[in-house]
Amino acid sequence: MSFFDRHYPYWPPNVPKTLSVPRTSIYYNLEVSAKRYPDRPAIQYYGTPLTYRELQRDVLALAGYLFYLAFRRAAPGPSESPPAPPV
């Protein structure tokens, strides 16, 4: 018995031991769920429900902020521009 299957003797009956992974992204799954069930709770955070619509909004806001940080870091600012060639 290996490290990865030593819990099998305690595994509940009729519960699969493996899961099939969908070929879609996590964001795509969230997008579909937000369209189908916009007002249903996606998660409960310390007893407060967060709907699929709110979760998608927050995910998009975080993605936009991360993109902003990456772009800001990659684009040189005015003080970081290379010097102009002498004329």
Image (cartoon, grey):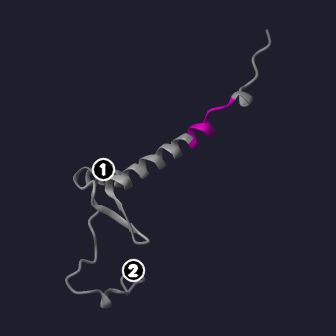
Sooner in the amino-acid sequence: mark 1 or mark 2: 2
SS assignment at label 1: helix
40, 32: nearer the viewer: 40
* 74 with respect to 27 (left or right): right
Residue at the image point whose x is 51% and y is 42% from the top: 67
Q: Which residue lies furthest to the right in this view?
A: 86
- Which secondary structure class fits the magenta region best? helix
User: Per the image, is 47 magenta?
Assistant: no
User: Per the image, is 71 magenta?
Assistant: yes
* 10 with respect to 82 (left or right): left
Q: Position of residue 57 (x, y in %)?
A: 39, 49
Q: In which quarter of the image is residue 44?
A: bottom left
Residue at the image point whose x is 48% and y is 43% from the top: 64
Q: Which amino acid does label 2 sit on?
A: Phe
Q: Position of residue 69 (x, y in %)?
A: 58, 43
Q: Which amino acid does label 1 sit on?
A: Glu
Residue at the image point whose x is 26% and y is 86% from the top: 12
Within 10 angstroms of label 2, few (less than 14), some, or many (20 or more) residues? Answer: few
Q: Which segment did they paint magenta?
A: 69-77
1, 35: nearer the viewer: 35
The N terminus is located in which quarter? Answer: bottom left
Give the residue number, with chain letter if any, for mark 2: 4
Give the residue number, with chain letter if any, for mark 1: 31
Q: Quadrant of residue 15?
A: bottom left
Which labelled disc corresponds to residue 23? none
65, 71: nearer the viewer: 65
* 1 with respect to 72 (left or right): left
Q: Where is residue 63 in the image (x, y as percent from the top left)?
A: 47, 47
